[in-house]
C-alpha cells in the first residue's frame, strides 16, 4: 500500500480496528525528518556456552515490524528475550566468538540497519539515564545538541533546545539543576523526560526505549506513556519500547503490542485485541482486570523448563503461527514508506 506521508489524520478520529486502517494513519501529526518503518525477518540470536557445550536460542526466528505514527511495545517475562530483541533491532548486540545473529533488519523495506545508519535516524534511550548532575535541564540539552549538531549554528541549537523543552512540557524546569539519581532536584518522571529530551534534539525518526517507565509509580508511568504516544501521533515518529507490567490506564495508550515468550513471538498486533487472542486459546480472565497482568501470568515459564512449560510454549507459538503470523507479514507488506532520496546518504 502506497501511503501519502503528507496526508494528515486527526488521531482522535482514527479507528485502529485493523492494520489496513493503521497503514492509513502513518501521516499523522508533524512529519519526522524521515518517516521510518522498521521491519525484521527470521531474526535469530544464539549464544554458545563452551563449558557446557550447549547453545541457547535467545531469539527464535522473530518476524515483525514497527511503523511511524504508532507506538510498538515489546513485553515478556524476565528472561523471555524482550530486551534482546530491542537491542538486536537497534544493532546493539555484541557479536563475539560464541554468539551470532541471523535474519534481516530493514529500514523502509530496502536499507539494512547498521550502526552507521542508526546514528543518523534513530536514538536509544536506556533504562538507566546518565545526566550530569550539576547541569541544569537546559544545559543538559545544550551539551547534547552541541555534540550531535556540530554543523548547526549556536542560534539554531538554542532554538532546537527550546523547542524540545516545550515539546516535552519541561520548560518550567529548564533552569533547575538536575542533581544525582540519589538526590534529584526534579521528579523521577521529569528526569525521564529530560533523558528522552536529550535524545530528541537530533529529531530522530526512530526511537528505542528500554523500559522507560521502570522505577516510576503508576501516575508518573502514565505521563511517560502519554508522551510517547504524542511523539508518535503528533511528530510521526516510530516508537519501539520494552515495558514490564504497565497499569491498565497506560496499556490503553498502546497501539501495537509484541509478546515474547522464551525467545519466540507469541503475539503481534493491536494491543486492544490481545485479550481476544488469549481467550481463543481457552484462557479465562476476570472482567475489568488489567490485560497486561493477565497475559503476563499466562506466559510465565519456569527455568529450567518443565514439561508443562514446553507444552505452554508450544501452544502459544503454534497458535500465533496459525492465526496471526501470516497476517502480520501481509500487513507489513502493505505499509510502504516512499522516499525520494537515498537514505544511506543522509
Image (tube, helix red, strand yellow):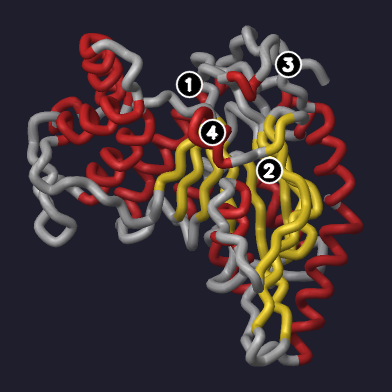
- Mark 3 or 2: the one toward you: 3
* Relative to 185, 321 lies left or right: right
| Residue tagged 4 | 206
Structural distance between the alpha carbons of marks 3 and 2: 24 Å
- Across and down, in percent, residue 35 comes to 60, 22
On residue 118, which mark appears?
A: none
Q: Residue at x 67, y 36 (%)?
A: 38
55 versus 208 height, above or below: below
**Is 272 or 233 nearer to us in this picture?**
233
| Residue tagged 2 | 270
Packing grade of label 3 (10 A; few <14, some 14-19, many >=20) is some
Q: What element carries label 2?
A: strand
Q: Which residue is drawn at 88% across and 54% down?
A: 323
- Mark 4 or 1: the one toward you: 4
Going from N to C along the chain, the mark reached first, 4 or 3, is 4
**Is 339 or 278 nearer to us in this picture?**
339
On residue 234, which mark appears?
A: 1
* Relative to 27, 282 lies left or right: right
- Across and down, in percent, residue 12 comes to 55, 23
Q: Residue at x 38, y 46 (%)?
A: 222
Structural distance between the alpha carbons of marks 3 and 1: 20 Å
Amino acid at each position: 500500500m502506497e501511503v501519502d506521508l503528507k496526508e494528515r489524520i486527526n488521531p482522535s478520529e482514527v479507528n485502529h480496528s485493523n492494520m489496513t486502517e493503521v497503514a492509513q494513519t502513518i501521516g499523522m501529526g508533524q512529519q519526522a525528518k524521515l518517516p521510518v518503518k522498521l521491519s525484521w525477518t527470521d531474526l535469530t540470536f544464539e549464544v554458545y556456552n563452551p563449558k557446557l557445550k550447549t547453545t541457547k536460542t535467545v531469539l527464535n526466528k522473530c518476524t515483525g515490524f514497527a511503523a511511524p505514527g504508532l507506538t510498538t511495545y515489546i513485553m515478556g517475562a524476565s528472561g523471555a528475550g524482550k530486551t534482546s530483541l530491542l537491542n538486536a533491532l537497534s544493532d546493539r548486540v555484541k557479536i563475539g566468538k560464541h554468539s551470532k545473529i541471523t535474519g534481516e533488519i530493514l529500514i523502509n523495506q530496502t536499507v539494512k540497519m547498521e550502526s552507521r545508519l542508526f546514528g543518523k535516524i534513530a536514538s536509544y534511550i536506556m533504562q538507566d539515564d546518565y545526566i550530569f548532575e550539576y547541569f541544569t535541564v537546559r544545559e543538559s540539552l545544550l551539551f547534547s545538541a552541541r555534540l550531535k549538531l556540530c554543523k548547526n549554528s549556536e542560534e539554531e541549537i538554542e532554538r532546537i533546545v527550546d523547542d524540545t523543552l516545550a515539546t516535552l512540557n519541561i520548560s518550567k524546569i529548564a533552569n533547575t539543576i538536575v542533581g544525582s539519581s540519589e538526590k534529584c532536584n526534579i521528579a523521577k518522571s521529569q528526569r525521564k523526560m529530560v533523558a528522552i529530551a536529550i535524545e530528541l534534539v537530533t529529531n530522530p525518526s526512530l526511537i528505542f526505549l528500554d523500559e522507560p517507565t521502570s522505577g516510576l509509580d503508576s501516575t508518573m508511568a502514565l505521563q511517560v506513556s502519554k508522551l510517547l504516544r504524542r511523539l508518535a501521533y503528533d511528530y510521526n515518529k516510530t516508537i519501539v519500547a520494552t515495558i514490564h507490567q504497565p497499569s491498565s490506564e497506560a496499556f490503553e495508550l498502546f497501539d501495537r503490542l509484541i509478546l515474547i515468550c522464551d525467545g519466540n513471538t507469541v503475539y503481534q498486533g493491536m494491543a486492544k485485541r490481545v485479550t481476544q487472542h488469549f481467550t481463543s486459546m481457552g484462557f479465562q480472565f476476570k472482567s475489568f482486570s488489567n490485560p497486561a497482568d493477565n497475559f503476563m501470568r499466562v506466559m510465565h515459564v519456569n527455568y529450567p523448563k518443565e514439561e508443562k512449560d514446553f507444552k505452554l510454549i508450544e501452544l502459544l507459538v503454534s497458535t500465533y503461527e496459525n492465526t496471526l503470523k501470516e497476517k502480520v507479514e501481509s500487513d507489513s507488506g502493505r505499509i510502504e514508506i516512499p522516499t525520494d532520496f537515498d537514505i544511506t546518504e543522509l
